Amino acid sequence: MLNLVLFGPPGAGKGTQAIFLKEEYGLIHLSTGDLLRSRIAEGTALGIEAKQYMDKGELAPDNIVIGMIRNTLKKYPDAQGFIFDGFPRTVPQAQALDEMLNKNNVPILGMLSLEVEKEELIKRLLNRAQISGRVDDQNQAVIKNRINVYNEKTFPLIEYYKSQNKFYAINGMGTVEDISRRLKEVVDQF
Ligand code: ADP
């Protein structure tokens, strides 16, 4: 099973490249941001709780996100593989994911980390703010907080995957096609 983690700071282009990987390799794309936003749109209790964190640029609690991933994985017993986008975002989330996957002998094969210069990230986020309609894209202070939260809680995952020899840095600058090609070069080795 081709299980991949797509990693990178907000604005790195994970969502865009996840669509490429999904089509190229026939995978299921699991974005916790998208899953949470659909819970919010449905008005579920989980959505209402998560929204309080998301609107401020904070992370939703681990137990909420881990439970959501666990339930979603069960819906695809015949999947050829998953692209995890925006998950894991904390070390406890990564440990929980490993536990879920290793139990079934379908581990993560690689963590693909999109590396983008800071100035470019901010440019992309401001650009996306014009079109996404997302509350957390509209406010500079919230964007800044998301980047701080990334540096503090999510960046340490690089070490987590390095220690398992699963870390792959991908240059995330250039055209969408350039970046897709670089990802493919790595994924084709798995
Ligand atoms: P981006 O990566 O551009 O910030 P996402 O759609 O991945 O966008 O995430 C939006 C928000 O959803 C995050 O700021 C956070 O509040 C929440 N979220 C998404 N994934 C997770 C996660 N794995 N753990 C906790 N919160 C999450």
Image (cartoon, rainbow, N blue to C red):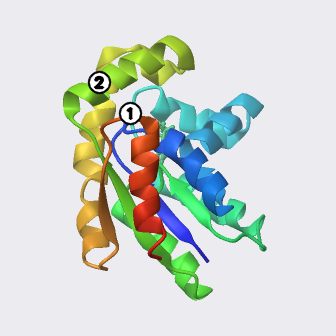
Residue 183 picture location, percent across and down? 42, 56
Name the foreground residue: 83 vs 86: 83
Seen at 31% across and 52% down, the residue is 154
Q: Please tell me how many numbered marks the rendered image carries.
A: 2
- The numbered dot on residue 122 is 2
Q: Mark 2 to mark 1: distance in Å?
A: 7 Å
Mark 2 beta carbon near ligand 1 (under 8 Å):
no
Name the foreground residue: 144 vs 172: 172
Residue 77 picture location, percent across and down? 77, 73
Residue 187 picture location, percent across and down? 47, 67
Question: What is the crowding at mark 2: few (fewer than 14 residues within 10 Å), some, or many (at least 20)?
Answer: some
Name the foreground residue: 115 vs 31: 115
Whether residue 170 appears in this view of the structure is yes
Name the foreground residue: 92 vs 80: 80
Q: Secondary structure at mark 1?
A: loop
Please tell me whether residue 122 is drawn above or below residue 158 in the rendered image.
above
Please tell me whether residue 96 is drawn above or below residue 182 in the rendered image.
below
Quadrant location of residue 56?
top left
Residue holding disc 1: 11
Residue type at tag 1:
Gly
Seen at 31% across and 68% down, the residue is 167
Residue 57 picture location, percent across and down? 39, 31
Seen at 64% across and 44% down, the residue is 35
Q: Name the N-terminal-most of marks 2 and 1.
A: 1
Mark 2–mark 1 CB contact (< 8 Å): yes
State the residue lying farthest toward the top: 130
Quadrant location of residue 41?
top right
Seen at 51% across and 19% down, the residue is 135
Mark 1 beta carbon near ligand 1 (under 8 Å):
yes
Residue type at tag 2:
Ile
Q: Quadrant of the N terminus?
A: bottom right
Q: Secondary structure at mark 2?
A: helix
